[in-house]
Image (cartoon, rainbow, N blue to C red):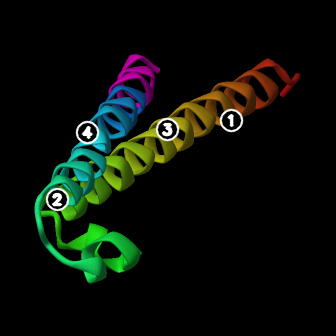
Amino acid sequence: MALGARFIKWGLGLFIFGLLLSFGPIGHHVIGANHPTGDAFLHNISLWFACPWTMAIAVIQLGGLGMVALGLTRLQIRRVQTTLRRCFCASPG
């Protein structure tokens, strides 16, 4: 159970860390708007994906959510195993 709880804790931590890192592409767009880059930069939202941080943020956040899912699965499997052991071991035989 401790391993599942650690997976959940670290997964949520990585997801929140990804939220903090998401200010990077926003800063990239704001700083780019201060320079003479032309109208395309200011009006084209798809240029946010030109920031090199975007893929790293997506990987960190998806990895964190994956860790949470694995941790919850591990906790649930452990609870089901404990319940089944109680049911079958405590039954009169």
Q: Give the range drawn in magenta.
A: 1-10
- What residue would you read off at disc 4? 21
User: Picture quarter containing residue 78?
Assistant: top right
Q: Is residue 38 above or below residue 52?
A: below
Nearer-the-camera pick, 90 or 21: 21
21 horizontally vs 16: left or right: left
Mark toward the start of the polypeptide (3 vs 4): 4
Mark 1 neighbour density, 10 Å: few (under 14) some (14–19) many (20 or more)? few
Residue 93 picture location, percent across and down: 84, 28
Mark toward the start of the polypeptide (3 vs 1): 3
Q: Is residue 85 above or below residue 33?
A: above
**Residue 80, disc:** 1
C-alpha separation, residue under disc 4 versus residue under disc 2: 18 Å
Mark toward the start of the polypeptide (1 vs 2): 2
Mark 3 neighbour density, 10 Å: few (under 14) some (14–19) many (20 or more)? some
Nearer-the-camera pick, 9 or 61: 61
Report if residue 54 lies within the magenta region: no
C-alpha separation, residue under disc 3 versus residue under disc 2: 45 Å
At label 1, which amino acid type do we have?
Answer: Val
Dots 3, 4 in contact, CB < 8 A:
no
- What residue would you read off at disc 2? 32
**Residue 74, disc:** 3
At label 4, which amino acid type do we have?
Answer: Leu
At label 3, which amino acid type do we have?
Answer: Arg
C-alpha separation, residue under disc 1 versus residue under disc 2: 54 Å
Residue 88 picture location, percent across and down: 77, 31
Residue 34 picture location, percent across and down: 18, 53
**Which residue is rendered at x = 65% and y = 25% of the image?**
82
User: Secondary structure under badge 2?
Assistant: helix
